[in-house]
Image (spheres, rainbow, N blue to C red):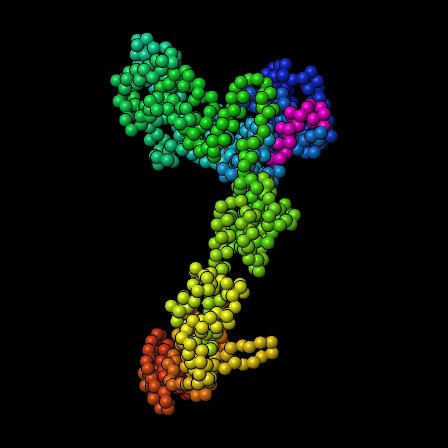
Amino acid sequence: MTFTDAEKDKALGIVNSLRNRLSTALLPDDEGKLRRILFSAIEEGRINRDVFGQNPVVMAMQTAYIAVDDIGLRRDSVIATLLTPVVLNNNYSLDEVEQDFGTGPKNILHGLLHIQELYKKTPVIETENFRNLLLSFAEDMRVILIMIADRVNIMREIRDTENTDAQQRVAEEASYLYAPLAHKLGLYKLKSELEDLSLKYLEHDAYYHIKDKLSATKRARDKYIEDFIGPIRQKLEKAGLRFHIKGRTKSIHSIWQKMKKQRCPFEGVYDLFAIRIILDSEPEQEKKECWQVYSIITDMYQPNPKRLRDWLSVPKSNGYESLHITVLGPENKWVEVQIRTERMDDIAERGLAAHWRYKGIKATGGGMDEWLTMVRSALEAGDDMQVMDQFRMDLYEDEVFVFTPKGEIRKFPMGATVLDFAYHIHSRIGNQCVGARINGRNVQIREELHSGDTVEILTSAQQKPKRDWLQIVKTSHARSKIRQAIKEAQAADGMYAKEVLYRRFKNRKIDVDESLMHQLIKKMGYKENSDFFIAIANGSLDVLTVIDRYLELKEPTAASDSENDNATHKSAAEYVMKEGGVEDVLVIDRNLKGVDYTLAKCCNPIYGDKVFGFVTVSGGIRIHREDCPNAPEMRSRYGYRIVKARWSGKGTGRYNITLQVTGNDDIDIVNNITSVISKEENTALRSINIDSDDGLFKGEITVALEDTSRLEALMKKLQSIKGVRLVKRA
């Protein structure tokens, strides 16, 4: 990279300005070392122009001047800023920085490098969490101040760039991130400039519309403000008050925000003007003289009572004191007037949390308010920034900020683990979490999170929440989700155990008396029914023991009656012996008794269909066809409730079955269909519904018949009717 003549002149001018501003702050050989390091990197071609075609060395010099002139930073910050181009390009190490210039510049550069890594990790910067993470990464607050100065410099220099995409991105970051940070630190001039330039690049038409309006009305506006102030000044002087008055016009960005909020044109922003009257009052006379000024102004101009803000009688919680009124001045224009004393103005203008809260930038916690106030106070102290060397980012010592694989930021309490992160994403992810990859490294679920980590959760469908997980997590959200999952799992196990137990009772033809069962549960020492069934589920209570105890509790003849009943109706259910165990098969015939079963409405099984049984929540069994449309879901989700079933003997009567018939529309089609059905033996027509459209008909026919053989014969005959295209079972 070579310097242009214009860049050389600019660099020389900045160096002279910095030398004059820093004077004795620099050590004797600082300037010589800086010159040697920068010239060496430039001559060896180790520094390249940035994405906007700007010279990084000149940009660093300009940033350093802003840091000194507008913020008040001193030697360490200037050296770190000037060395940034060579350090970021790995041309000069941090150890070399420390050896040549000391620990101060090294620490600042370390923070700048850390934040560059943060930028590479996530594209999502327009969040409060990102601002907090940025602060937590900046161990020395001067890092943030330099970044604000750097962003102001970039925004000034990219006006004519052809790289509009990069310009857009930089402007968005200035609006979302750096302007609010500048405001929090009391850097109001830089904050206002960042907002105006962001608007210029992001809302070009709106910016120049307002700018042109302001330019066109500047002379008239200045005259108006002077005409408005003149009579007030005379009245205040006549009253013997000591004061000075400032008049101003709102910034372009502020006007644009007003226009959007109030949905009005430029001319509709009624508080375009603002006047500040600052009194030189004795402490005991402050309120009295402020209200005296209020009385004088409202006698001269009509006030808007809805716009009165009295922070004299009751100051804001952050200490802000002032009296704001809006009055109707000459030409029916609204003017905001702020009345305060020198002391109040000092507090409001020093950059305390009071002022940036007043402007609507929400705080993230009391700790940040106090800490940023300390930073701003140190800036204004003019003590060569030595106090800043002691500042470290302990504000977020109780919080960590980590990334999702997509670069989104999540905040957790210090000590939070992988499992907390998993449950934060989704309870299902948490329930199935088996570990994670943090920064590409596999870790266990109890691994603690640290700021800047990128966390990818690993899951397994076989994983289930465990009670000891409650000792791993730190967040109440994760803890409550784990308890809920364990409770639901126990409830499901208990329900399954109840189904198993009641099936065993039915297999032995024992009618279950719920009141007697409840009595048994209490007698066996369980306070809740759910605890009783959970004990069966986890194996601590045997099913056979429960049945025996139930029979003992029942009348003495219960056992023998049950055995006789079982022998009498042995044909109702058979046990099919298989290698490795016993499998229940429900055999359906006309003698089936003692089993509560129904035929499913969703598939309407009839005698001869391949079927299976499904144990319902009430304990009954519903018979479905093997090809029932609901069968796949029942098998996948409730496989433990499936009972094998088959027909035996002869059919138990007639079954209603619905057929869907389609074909060519014909005047005799209905008669032909009903004629075929009426001729079928032991088959009755229950209903017929035929609709025709554009020469075609569709119909549903419900018939009652005995079994599948009758059904197949009927369907074949219907299919043979002239004009019928398709006959299928519904």
Label total for image:
0
Residue closer to the observer: 655 or 408: 655
Q: Please check the rendered image and state whether residue 111 is part of the magenta-colored stretch, yes or no.
A: yes
Residue shown at the point (49%, 46%) measured from the top left: 476
Q: Please check the rendered image and state whether residue 122 is part of the magenta-colored stretch, yes or no.
A: no
Q: Residues in magenta?
A: 96-116
Residue shown at the point (40%, 33%) measured from the top left: 257
Residue closer to the observer: 541 or 483: 541
Up-down: is 697 above or below 634? Answer: below
Residue closer to the observer: 200 or 462: 462
Q: Position of residue 365 (x, y in %)?
A: 47, 33
**Residue 422 in view, yes or no:** no
Q: Position of residue 505 (x, y in %)?
A: 46, 74
Question: Which of the 4 quarters of the picture holds residue 389?
Answer: top right
Up-down: is 180 above or below 699? Answer: above
Query: In the shown orientation, is residue 171 left or right of residue 664?
Result: right
Question: Which of the 4 quarters of the picture holds residue 218?
Answer: top left
Query: In the shown orientation, is residue 123 left or right of residue 703?
Result: right
Work out which quarter of the rendered image holds the N terminus and state it. Answer: top right
Residue shown at the point (36%, 78%) measured from the top left: 700
Up-down: is 243 above or below 594? Answer: above
Query: In the shown orientation, is residue 730 left or right of residue 292?
Result: right
Query: In the shown orientation, is residue 108 left or right of residue 612?
Result: right
Q: Position of residue 590 (x, y in %)?
A: 41, 85
Residue shown at the point (43%, 71%) measured from the top left: 553
Question: Which of the 4 quarters of the picture holds residue 157?
Answer: top right
Work out which quarter of the rendered image holds the C terminus and state it. Answer: bottom left
**Residue 54 in view, yes or no:** yes
Q: Magenta region, mostly helix, strand or loop? A: helix
Q: Position of residue 493 (x, y in %)?
A: 50, 63
Up-down: is 723 above or below 386? Answer: below
